[in-house]
Amino acid sequence: MVEVRRHNAAFCQPCFVHHVHETVKRSVKSHRMFGPDQRIMVAVSGGKDSLGLWDILLELGYRVTGMYLGLGIGQYSERSRRVTRAFAEERGAELVDVDLQGEYGYDIPTAGRKGSRSTCAVCGLSKRYVFNRVALDHGFDVVATGHNLDDEAATLLGNTLRWQTEYIARQFPVLPQREGMVKKVKPLYRLSELETAAYAFLRCIDYVVEECPLVGGHTQLRYKAAMNQLESTSPGTKAQFLLGYIDRAAPLFRNEDKAELSPCERCGQPTTGRFCAFCRARAQVLGERLGAPGPAAEDDRQVAGELSEEVLPAELYGDAPVGR
Amino acid sequence: MVEVRRHNAAFCQPCFVHHVHETVKRSVKSHRMFGPDQRIMVAVSGGKDSLGLWDILLELGYRVTGMYLGLGIGQYSERSRRVTRAFAEERGAELVDVDLQGEYGYDIPTAGRKGSRSTCAVCGLSKRYVFNRVALDHGFDVVATGHNLDDEAATLLGNTLRWQTEYIARQFPVLPQREGMVKKVKPLYRLSELETAAYAFLRCIDYVVEECPLVGGHTQLRYKAAMNQLESTSPGTKAQFLLGYIDRAAPLFRNEDKAELSPCERCGQPTTGRFCAFCRARAQVLGERLGAPGPAAEDDRQVAGELSEEVLPAELYGDAPVGR
């Protein structure tokens, strides 16, 4: 039996799996995330959410390919890759396996030590960039990530506590394709962390349980804790918060996303400045110089405005779990 | 020494009192709450916030009168009235003393038992109505209440978690005068509960410390707890949330307040229906009948839309401390 308090329901195993599939189907349909003929790339970290999402989309018969990005975080990354490969092999599913060091010349621990950004910030930035790049290069129609209800509610809480209206405006289950940016979707946004964990367990998915060893301060976890506290006395608080935003409040923020993008002079990806945040960060880590000297200080708002339709300031400022 | 972590400051006694006065002056000025010639009515419960506010406005030389509403909650109300009267006498300040039972024929414990609303809901409704009525009858220009930063942040959190955009739209330090509604202001909105308590202590104000004995479930307290938890690891969270809303997000919600008001057929106060929520609630408690049979069920949204520019759904749904 799996109890879902906010639905005041308890499911047996097959019914729970059915409930998860139906919830995802409904999310995909109501936001027109993708159709049966489109090619979907799932960004896979090896955790329960992204592997669960991959499994669900395979089960629902979609044309879905996994994409694993090796971040070079020692044992943690090795185990993540192993688990992801095993998942793909078991199901005969396609997997694109990219290595950050191999493709771009740095790994996350080095970037965290050498750059001016926190480890989580540069990791989030790198992931968003590479996901988009790989999807473009391989001709995928859409990138799907495993963000669940708890992730999204915590991020929304963080953005709302600071009334970062631009970030709030960009937090949506679907971000349409723009010049140089692949469409992005979050099909699990209606499922809680408890539900995605139960799903992975019931489907016997072997996933990496540990948190990334580099995750430190973790603002996002504090927001999750606050939401969990409220949820415990008032089941449904998280869902009400996130879904209420999507249904009623998002239109009020629509005009707050003011980022104007033009191609990065180095890589051609859209950016609000001359060089994109990824190229700037990478150049810094590798000790390279990008063109003529630009503006002295980097503007975090600019960084947030770039590449980051799914802007998670939490990620930018050092908080999101790696690999999602 | 009083430490204020979010300002990263510690004040000696005279400096702290000065800091509080300056903060209130700044709030009054920046929102044009009132001028030196206007007549201000402070709604006084006998608690630290409202007595502190009264003290501050007297110290700053404003034309201010206290207004105490006796709610008939046994010992608690008696002690509140005693403390309020003593404060007024000590300072030679004007006090308007109104008794709910004497003026309107019911007290709060009876209303809580007999009516269909929770005790806190009918109490909040009654206070808002009577404050406005008394201010109109006595020709006051503005009603000031002692809502502090913690109150306002908690209310905003509650409204935001449910994205109750109409309530969010109406939560502001100043609500302008409208037909039949006196202007309302919250001069303490920039001061935390800790600061108002320290102020009352340093100024030797004798106030009622106990919570209202009728306060039960207390959703508002849960929001305060959540905010306190976030504040403890990240000082300034509350202020950032409330002030960020006021500065940046409030304009986005401006058009969400859609209540259209017309006079109540019984008392003439503005309402969205035929009879105002106060008259309906009172009639219910007293077993009276209001005109011809109206719509069968009361609509909580309507209740919220009425009389309640300072709508605290928390109050309406049973959560706010009595007497503020």
Image (cartoon, coloured by chain):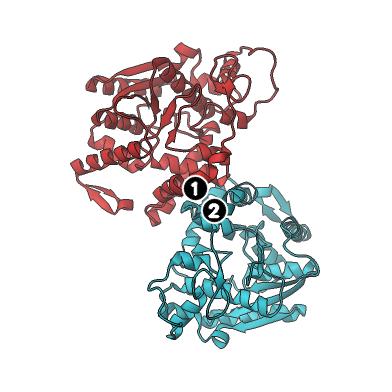
Chain colours: A red, B cyan
Q: Residues within 10 Å of mark 2 (few under 14, many from 20)?
A: some
Q: Position of residue A60 (x, y in %)?
A: 25, 31
- Kindly identify the amino acid type of the residue bearing the numbered disc 1: Ala
Q: Is residue A113 left or right of residue A17?
A: right
Chain under disc 2: B
Q: Is residue A290 left or right of residue B16?
A: left
Q: Is residue B237 left or right of residue A3?
A: right
Regarding residue A37, the answer to whether it shows in the image is: yes
Q: Position of residue A4 (x, y in %)?
A: 29, 49
Chain under disc 1: A
- As helix, strand or loop, the secondary structure at mark 2 comes to helix
Please report the residue visible at 58 percent of the width from the left and 64 percent of the height from the top. B310
Name the residue tied to disc 2.
B228
Q: Position of residue B171 (x, y in %)?
A: 58, 58
Please tell me the numbered disc located at residue A197.
none
Label 2 – label 1 distance at C-alpha: 25 Å
Foreground pick, B257 / A324: B257
- Foreground tag (2 vs 1): 1
Foreground pick, B252 / B311: B252
Name the residue tied to disc 1.
A249
